[in-house]
Image: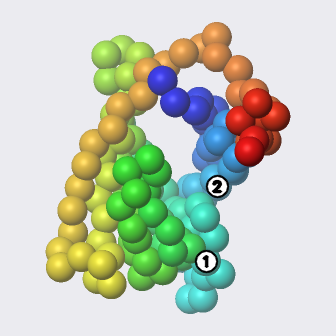
Amino acid sequence: VGMPIEILQDESRITILHEYDHQVRRIFMDGRSHPDRVRPTLMGHSIGSWDGPALVIDTVGLKPSYFRPSGIPYSQEARVTERFTLREDGQILETEITVDDPHYYMGTWSFTKYASYEPDTDILEYDCTVRSHLAP
């Protein structure tokens, strides 16, 4: 379960639309490097390349926060490398994530997550309003 994403691809960029909080992530695929100065944002600055069938994404410039929903923190110094690979005839998206953050961690660490392909799922409007029956 969870909040769905939609992935759009063209020659120079991959865009990921998140249902959660209407976040938009842009992965530049045109061979550029990260800029010398990056204003920290929730999604950071991402560049990608293909390694065979795997999409490898390098992200810097993240605004200090924590990985959701686990609550594991990361700082502005974090560098996140993701390796997206389609499995099971394109029905499962495997994402290997490696985190290098010298502010919080003594070494790099990794985890893997999986998402299923659900072509009939729509990105809905994200509404985080407090319902009247839950308000004090």
Three-letter amino acid code at disc 1?
A: Pro
Q: Where's residue 26, x and y in %?
A: 64, 55
Q: Residue at x 32, y 52 (%)?
A: 97
Q: Residue at x 63, y 32 (%)?
A: 6
Residue extending farthest top: 120
Q: Where's residue 80, x and y in %?
A: 39, 64
Say if 33 sits above or below 57 in the image.
below
Q: Which residue is mark 2?
A: 26
Residue 10 in view, yes or no: no
Q: Where's residue 123, x and y in %?
A: 71, 28
Of the pair 89 and 118, the residue shown nearer to us: 118
**Which quadrant is the C terminus positioned in?**
top right
| 64 lies left or right of 119 | left
Say if 125 sits above or below 105 in the image.
above
SS class of the residue under badge 1?
loop
Q: Residue at x 71, y 35 (%)?
A: 134
Q: CA distance from mark 1 to mark 2?
A: 14 Å
Q: Which residue is mark 1?
A: 40
Three-letter amino acid code at disc 2?
A: Arg
Label at residue 124:
none
